[in-house]
Amino acid sequence: MTSLHPETIALHGGFRKDPATNSVAVPIYQTASYQFDGAQHAADLFALKELGNIYTRLMNPTHDALEQRITALEGGVAALAVASGQAASTYAILNICQAGDNFVTSTDLYGGTWNLFSHTMKQMGIEARFVDPADPEAFARATDAKTRAWYAETLPNPKLQVFPIAEVAALGRKIGVPLIVDNTAAPIICRPLDHGAAVVMYSTTKYIGGHGTSIGGIVVDGGNFDWAAHAERFPLLTQPDPSYHGAVWTEAVKPLGPIAYILKMRVTLLRDTGAATTPFNAFLHIQGLETLPLRIRAHCENAAKVAAYLFTHPKVARVIHPSVQTGAARARAEKYLKGGMGGLLGFELKGGLAAGRAFIDALELFYHVANIGDARSLAIHPASTTHAQLTAEEQLATGVSEGYVRLSIGIEHIDDILADLEQALEKA
Ligand code: PLP
């Protein structure tokens, strides 16, 4: 299957039919382990002389179909599906950072990632250095010999300003630092690897799953970063690994292709810390993936219409969506987002906290949930939920005011979406 079109890859990429049964739908391989063909077969699998199934914590044919399909969609070389988006970002960093190391990250992050980086990683002795994403040079200025990666989100909410992927990735490549991009909010409409990112990750819980049914994450290796050329920066990939009988990952994978980063993640981090996905969740995320290109278009079209509607509403002070941005932010959105500007949208009610709460309580079609990327329309008022513990100044620094409402626009008929917003705004 050689198509380069995402609509086709999403249905056929990486899996055509089940080799055992000819099943067209990807089967749910609900098994913990796999019988070895004999002692030599088992020895070869454990020694990585042959790649194959050992134990579902490490690999599973259903997980493999999801990994191969997303790899094909992203233009990468291999992927690792894990239990959640949080597990994916944790592994993306821990795979190359150890105690005493640091990485540089954009300040515009999902709150859970912010906590992970500023608290849990710190407890592990890994320093996250936060920089302003609008200034690509800031990444270079914050970098030293112990910096192992740069990290950013393509379309971070609540600011929804597209990250300058190519500008930052190119600076990093000059000094041998890979850019890891969380593309959760922009699947299909952006392919970060095409712009120079080395690694892409997703919370598959969101648009990829698309139906709000199950938690998952995935890390995709671009295979486009020469770890060995910067060997001193990546000892975890270029020095003998005592946890795997002294394997040097950049050497060990040579017969298999440029997959040192992702193979090492699977056979050490996933083996040891065990944030495996499940065959059933992988199956559900494959189901979602099959219609993702269609759905993302509908999300984007509806969101742009909602942005235009809110833009002129008398109770709305500000609308946050790339389609209504101007200047540099708009130029970046046009450069990086193709076929739509995303389904996430924010707006600020003139009436502040009370208006935000009244609006949320009045919604009838929109669900009031802590999630994004469901086929259904979703809403949340961060000042009374995710951002409630922050001071008013801190809320503003993160781009959230007391009257700020976040919407994840679904794929219902646009007239019904606008009607629900209209009646809720009347009560706000
Ligand atoms: N990255 C982004 C941009 C997210 O929005 C989220 C979740 O909201 C995550 C990562 C974490 O994903 P999960 O909830 O699947 O652990």
Image (cartoon, rainbow, N blue to C red):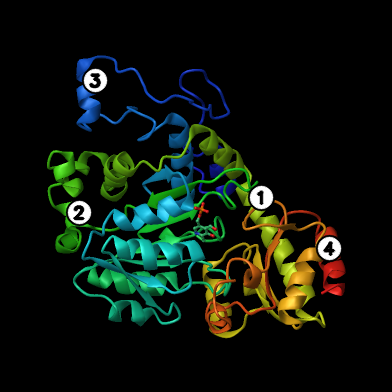
Q: Earlier in the sequence, mark 1 or mark 3?
A: 3
Specify the amino acid type for callout 3.
His
Number of the front mark, 4 or 3: 4
Name the residue nearer the viewer: 141 or 333.
141
SS for dot 3? helix
Specify the amino acid type for callout 1.
Leu
Task: Give the distance between the C-alpha atoms of the residues marked 2 and 3, in whole angstroms.
Answer: 28 Å
At a point 75% along the width and 77% down the height, the residue shown is 354
At a point 74% along the width and 62% down the height, the residue shown is 302
Name the residue nearer the viewer: 99 or 207.
99
Q: Is residue 201 left or right of residue 386?
A: left
Name the residue nearer the viewer: 347 or 306.
347
Residue 420 badge:
4
Specify the amino acid type for callout 4.
Asp
- Provide residue 297's location: percent of width, then percent of height: 66, 57
Label 3 beta carbon less than 8 Å to ligand 1: no
Q: What residue does disc 3 label?
A: 41
At a point 21% along the width and 26% down the height, the residue shown is 44
Q: Earlier in the sequence, mark 4 or mark 3?
A: 3
Number of the front mark, 1 or 4: 4
Circles 2 and 3: CB distance less than 8 Å? no
Residue 110 visible in the picture: no
